[in-house]
Amino acid sequence: MSSIDLPASVPFREVTDRNGRRYRIGETDVDLMGRTRTWMVILPWVGMMGISSAEYAFTSAEDTLHEAQLWSSGHIFWLLGVWVFFQAAVAFPAGQLRESGRLPARTAMLIGAAGTLVGYLALAFAPNVVVAYLGFGMCSGIGAGLVYATCVNMVGKWYPERKGGKTGFVNGGFAYGSVPFVFLFTSVLDLSNYRVLLSSVGIGLCLVVASAGWFFRDPPKNWWPPHVNPLKATQDRRIRRALEKNPPAIKQYTPREAARTPVLWMMWFCLLCTAGINIFGIAFQVPFGKDMGFAGGIVATAMSLKAIVNGTGRGVIGWISDRYGRRHTLIIVCIVLGTAQFGVLVSGQLHSMPFFLFCSMVSGFGGGAIFPLFAAMTADYFGENNNATNYGMVYSSKLISGLVGSGLGAVVVGEWDYHGAFVLAGSVGLASAVLALFLKAPGRPSARRIVPNPHPLGEEMA
């Protein structure tokens, strides 16, 4: 039985609301996959943890890679930029393949696991930096992109009625999983063990991602949990509030239809700016802290706290956005992210370790929160059926933000020093908050209360 096959003994029907959107109801999660949908939160969370170290812990290995492989710091920062480029580049084509059924979720996860292994082996054994760009930057980036796109969109499919908190929790794994590796690469990795250590990490993470992905399953198109009537206001206060603040899309937009709406490209640009700031912080917080005289252990602690709060922020912000609305939450997050960049700069210049740690955590919170917000917002605005592809279009802005935040960030630091770079990053964050004011769901000028359809069209589909 494939992931979308339905046992013949389980009846279902499709109903249509007053906007013409169809909902498939009657089947429970257990009917469809033999287990509760909670597993489709836990397993994607584990898969996301398995790919996170490549982005969030990579620069912690800079000193050892520089000495062992004789790669310049510029090459190392561009390696991260190339990784982010391919990680984002695969989102849209992977979404198309996933939605068409040509790339099952399990297959995508297994390919992603293999890419993770290849990336770490390339860092350990690459004879030159070109091989590192191909193995780590391209193969590992593509693998991580497949895992990311599969995990994030899986949750929205299984929780269409309250996706913010669940999407945020899964997205948080993309930061949590890097925490032990920040300390490992900062304190343990050296010239005597880097090949064994990097190879072992690659094998271990490959097994983690593959094991989680083996049990992935997609629900049928238009599936809606049977305990929540899509045509009437539910009695569950949490679900009712979430649907009032973030109404379902008026229809299931195809990628072509979504691309014709101005709001999708406004979201693309807003994510470009905020993700660029996040990657800039990941790439340059460690070297900035060292230049400001903080000990290596303090810098590693700051980066770990940033990763922890980054992951926590993704989960918490998803829950908050369910309660208060995705757009309003995004505006606050952009303000926090932009302001934090000024705080990191000032804390370093004052040589204040507690302030530096605090601002790093605040920056991590804002930088992590943006991703689940945009993932859930895309499904809210354009529907769940094609969310892998539609979010892939929005997420493709990370193609540029990775290069801007890491590679171009190195150029800005070289020309303007850290002061100019952090001021620029903070200013872009505050400007993103202004842009977020204009993000409105297509066909729905404001978040209105859901009005039950007095004459729902019920269509039996036995």
Image: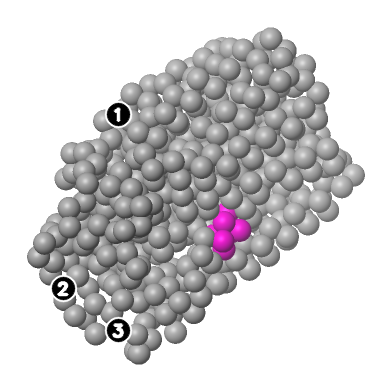
Res 437 label: 1
Of tags 1 and 2, which is closer to the observer? 2
Q: Position of residue 424 (x, y in %)?
A: 49, 17
Q: Is residue 204 above or below residue 309?
A: below
Name the amino acid, label 1: Leu
- Residue 76: which quarter of the image? top right
Q: Earlier in the sequence, mark 3 or mark 1?
A: 3
Q: Position of residue 26 (x, y in %)?
A: 31, 76
Q: Compute the Cα span from label 1 to label 2.
A: 37 Å
Res 366 label: none
Q: Quadrant of the N terminus?
A: bottom left
> Residue placed at 45% from the left, 31% from the top?
333
Total numbered labels: 3
Residue 458 appears anywhere in the view: yes
Q: Is residue 175 above or below residue 205?
A: above
Q: Compute the Cα span from label 3 to label 2.
A: 14 Å
Q: Which residues are magenta?
A: 42-48
Of tags 3 and 1, which is closer to the observer? 3
Q: Which residue is farthest top? A: 350
Q: Which residue is mark 2?
A: 458
Name the amino acid, label 3: Pro
Q: Which residue is mark 3?
A: 11
Q: Position of residue 389 (x, y in %)?
A: 35, 55
> Residue placed at 19% from the left, 70% from the top?
15
Q: Is residue 231 left or right of residue 118?
A: left
Q: Is residue 369 above or below residue 388?
A: above
Q: Compute the Cα span from label 3 to label 1.
A: 44 Å
Label 3 crowd bin: few (<14), some (14–19), many (20+), radius 10 Å: few
- Residue 20: which quarter of the image? bottom left
